[in-house]
Amino acid sequence: MASPKVWLITGRAIGTSSGFGRRLVSIILAHGDRVIATARSLAKINHSDFHDSSNLELKSNVYCAELDISVGTAKVKTQVDAAVRQSGWGTVDVLVNNAGSGLPGLLEEGGSQDVTNAVLSYMRQQRSGTVVMMGSRSAWKTEISGMLYRSNSLTSILAMAETMALELEPMGIRVLIVEPGAFRTEGIYSNRFDESNPISDYDEERGKSVVTFSAISGKQPGDPDKAMKAVVEVVCGEGRAKGREWPLYLVLGKDAQEDIGNKCARMIRHLGEWGDVIRNVDLDQTSTQ
């Protein structure tokens, strides 16, 4: 039987006690693996969030640690090393970068990259590991009024992860980019729509965007438990992922499939319709001699 994997999961400000993070921890523990569950404050995490507190075996397989990904490279590294050491497991086999996936901003000011760099030192040493980047279909559907900062952050995650996959493959480290659609998790739409710098020309558009944003909560079609089960299956090569080639991308949800498919189709259509212009910009042969 394979040794249990050690997973380190980052979380948003509310930590791994809600949303995708809480579901993922519970599913990983049920799978028999170990988890370093993190949040900015330990007060945000409870063992009872993940399992029956009377189950001592499951309790021994989760270590809760404080990790604030916004404090800079050196301090993030110190926090990660402390969590790995104090857990008693001494390494990380799977990193799930879940922090910032629902927040506006640019990768939480570099925090996701800082955590990844800190964990990669363990994976490089053992020449194996998996980095899971929680993105969103919003990286592909950026044409949504009022969502510039969120889309900017998520497209940065996508670009960073695609490059990492190429650079880390020779060291036996895999990257999985998870692109979920709308899932019914707690708090994802609790952040207020930013109206701190209103410009009168946008009053009508802003009003529509606020109404649309506020109406989503509680109506998302996706089941977060099913989504996180799919992530674990892919990482472990089990269930529906057994025998399949490793996917760089894991799109989750019918809405995500539709939005990403539409963007790809639009680009392919553009390449066909504008092919004569696209291909007719090289230097003339006589100019290159």
Image (cartoon, rainbow, N blue to C red):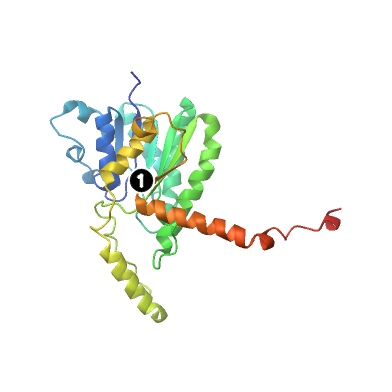
Residue nearest the viewer, comparing 169 with 138 = 138
Residue nearest the viewer, comparing 109 with 94 = 94
Mark 1 Cα-neighbour bin, 10 Å: few <14, some 14–19, many ≥20: many
Residue 268 picture quarter: bottom right
Q: Residue furthest bottom?
A: 200
Residue 85 picture quarter: top left
Give the amino acid at mark 1.
Asn
Residue nearest the viewer, comparing 148 with 264 = 264
Camera sees residue 65: no
In this image, 158 relative to 275: left or right?
left
The N terminus, quarter of image: top left
- Residue at the location (78% across, 58% down)? 283
Asked if residue 184 is positioned above or below residue 50 in the image, the reply reads: below
- Residue at the location (43% across, 63% down)? 148
Q: Residue furthest left?
A: 54
Read off the residue under disc 1. 98
Horizontal and vertical percent position of residue 216? 28, 61
In this image, 189 relative to 257: left or right?
left
User: Which element carries disc 1, helix, strand or loop?
Assistant: loop
Asked if residue 156 is positioned above or below residue 177 in the image, the reply reads: below
In this image, 289 relative to 237: left or right?
right
Horizontal and vertical percent position of residue 263? 48, 57
Asked if residue 98 is positioned above or below residue 278 in the image, the reply reads: above
Horizontal and vertical percent position of residue 285? 83, 55
Residue nearest the viewer, comparing 242 with 116 = 242
Horizontal and vertical percent position of residue 93? 39, 30
